[in-house]
Amino acid sequence: MAAYDADSSAGGDLAYDPNFVPDSVKTFVVHLYRQIREKNVYEIHQMYEGSFNRLTDRMFRESPWPTAEAVEPYVDGDHVFCLLYREMWFRHVYARLTPTPKQRVESWDNYCNLFGVVLHGVVNMQLPNQWLWDMVDEFVYQFQSYCQYRAKLKNKTEEELQLLRNFDQAWNVYGVLNYLQALVEKSNIIQILEREKEGLEQFTVDNGYDYQGGSNVLKMLGYYSMIGLLRVHCLLGDYRTGLKCMAPIDLSQQGVYTNVIGSHISTIYHYGFANLMLRRYGDAIREFNKMLLYILKYKQYHQKSPQYDQILKKNEQMYALLAVCLSLCPQQKLVDENVSTQLKEKYNDKMTKMQRYDDEASTVYDELFSYGCPKFITPSAPVLDEPLMNYNQEAYRLQLKMFLFEVKQQQLLAGIRSFLKIYSTITVTKLAQFMDVDEATLRTILMTYKHKMHSTDNDGKIVSNADIDFYVDDDTVHVVEAKPTKRFGDYFLRQILKFEEMISELEKVQLD
Amino acid sequence: MAKEAQQQVSYTVEELVAVNPYNPDILADLENYVNEQVSSQKYSLDANLCLLRLYQCEPERMSPPIVARILIKALMAMPAQDFSLCLFLIPEQVQSEEQFKTLIVLSHYLETARFRLFWDEVAKNRSLLESVPGFQQAIEAYAVHVLSLTYQKVPRAVLAEAINKEGLALDQFLEYHVANSGWAIEKSQGRSQLIVLPPNEFNHPELKKNASDSVSYEHVTRIFPVLS
């Protein structure tokens, strides 16, 4: 993939002229500009997803689109349109080419300008949610990419180092977090979601769009920024704060976050991962299961979409993480049959190994965690004096180390579990004999099992994740099998609503 | 007057963390707040995570004594997982410093219920831990918690080891909990005492509410239009 610097025409393909605007592009921008002015969200979406990608495939596979300056005259010099166009321009460079250091910095500037305009409340457009999600997603992605880029100092040229020195504010972590936070606050999205619970808002019903002639841009950017914040906090290793940022969104229901598949997957993936690191294995398993089932059912409809590869990748990562969760915290009833089949196909051997808790198990945990985890980043600015080193792996190594340490602490529990499955009562003495440890050690193992299998939720309440449980009476262990729970309440609710719907449909039928 | 001013500071810090957390200027306030948590036996995980994040972004401003105090407070919050949450934000080189290695070992012992080893290690590090009031009691509470998850009736010796008390001190401890926490003492077959812990859903499975069948209020409201 070639790197294109719009300024230098010396290197690279001489065929690319940043100022040349082919006719098809002229038509495209004129058309898109008009649709945006007339707020035809459907047409905008068609052009954004369809025409843009077709033109890219046809003419811009290996070079950037014409610059915003070049297309400006065809869109009345509209400042905001140019910011939007530039955002797509940079996104295309990141996706198909390799951005130059200068382009990375310029993209940051563009986001600052774009978000600045939106935060001032002067944007009056309606844009498709897909586009608005892509903006936030790309913003976080480019931040992550920049942190990785500047952490690899070893082979940088003097020119690149100078750029890092001069533009030390570009993609700085406070800036990124503050923009996302500002979008959440200025859009009032948290209050909107609160009021919706009391029936005072139509946000979810309208899918975030404004049918009173207003704009959905600030609102939706605010909404998606909550997911953006979850993602950034996961990349930094602050899982608790990440989950807090997401708290206003109710994941037990459909919502605006499920309507764009990219946002759905990103939400659940990061939510699940954060819960895994917080040892809330039950919650992680439940959410991964739901998401994987959804992807299984609906991925065929997204085969033509530009996000398809990403969807498949995240799908595979979630299977790996699910395998890890189920090995640490075996559960019988939480995983759907179809997902379970897929999981066994991919990871049956590895899961058996992980549940053995020996050194080989550690290797498998390492492998699956490393495959499934996000690309962690070091947020601090690079130290630019000699000796120059690469430290882009540091953040990942820390999270991996902490995770494997936790796995090691749980190593003793596998033995206990296999005995608890067989016996309904057994004395401490006998169990210690079977496990080849002394009694005192066995008692500590029993307590460790209890501690590790119970997690604390956000309100400090203790929740059990154990499928097999026990209690100790002096020196006898009594095993308790967790009863499978039937969720009657939910079932009845769903049926009531379904029948009500059917009845009203029937009432509409007029018999002659 | 001084107390009022103190209350005002902590109110402001919590507000700052909620409203403007990504702001390097509040670093000094957060550090003061850590010291305040220690001296007045309060605790705020969110404020401490906020500070650790700032240290992550500007490692030159990190203060090891403050980080140590945050970690000790986190240990005291067990069984909550605060200690690992903090460690996720502390770079490896920092974690390998002596005092942090000690704290990590202490956490490891608590996580794996190795109370004997834990209290031995505490004895070797008095100066580090005595600077935080309430440490002893907090760990005792955690020990009692784990015992309550596990045992209906626990032998005296096991309890003694877990809370690091013997003889008269242990008797006083038992007396207090018999009077206030619903504990009871039995004699077990000529051997020493058996402490009967109050029943809860973890050591008495028959008490476990079928919690997952309860339906949240919000979901029930969905059928109100149908019922009316």
Image (tube, rainbow, N blue to C red):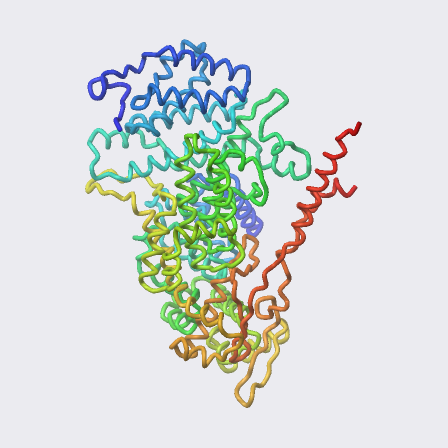
Q: Viewer-proximal residue, A80 or A70? A: A70
Q: Is residue B149 left or right of residue A228?
A: right
Query: Residue lying farthest front?
Result: A512
Indicate the quadrant containing the N terminus of chain A: top left, top right, bottom left or bottom right. Answer: top left
Q: Viewer-proximal residue, A512 or A123? A: A512
* Residue A392 percent coordinates (x, y): 29, 43
Q: Is residue A181 visible?
A: no
Query: Compared to A13, does A108 lie above or below?
Result: below
Give the residue displayed 52% in from the left and 25% down from the top: A128
Give the residue displayed 26% in from the left and 18% down from the top: A7
* Residue B4 percent coordinates (x, y): 58, 49
The image shows a total of numbered marks equal to 0
* Residue A291 percent coordinates (x, y): 50, 44
Query: Compared to A298, does A3 lie above or below?
Result: above
* Residue A450 percent coordinates (x, y): 50, 66
Q: Is residue A16 visible?
A: yes
Indicate the quadrant containing the C terminus of chain A: top left, top right, bottom left or bottom right. Answer: top right
Q: Which quadrant would residue B200 be assigned to in this image?
A: bottom right
Give the residue displayed 59% in from the left and 42% down from the top: A253
Q: Viewer-proximal residue, B29 or A264? A: A264
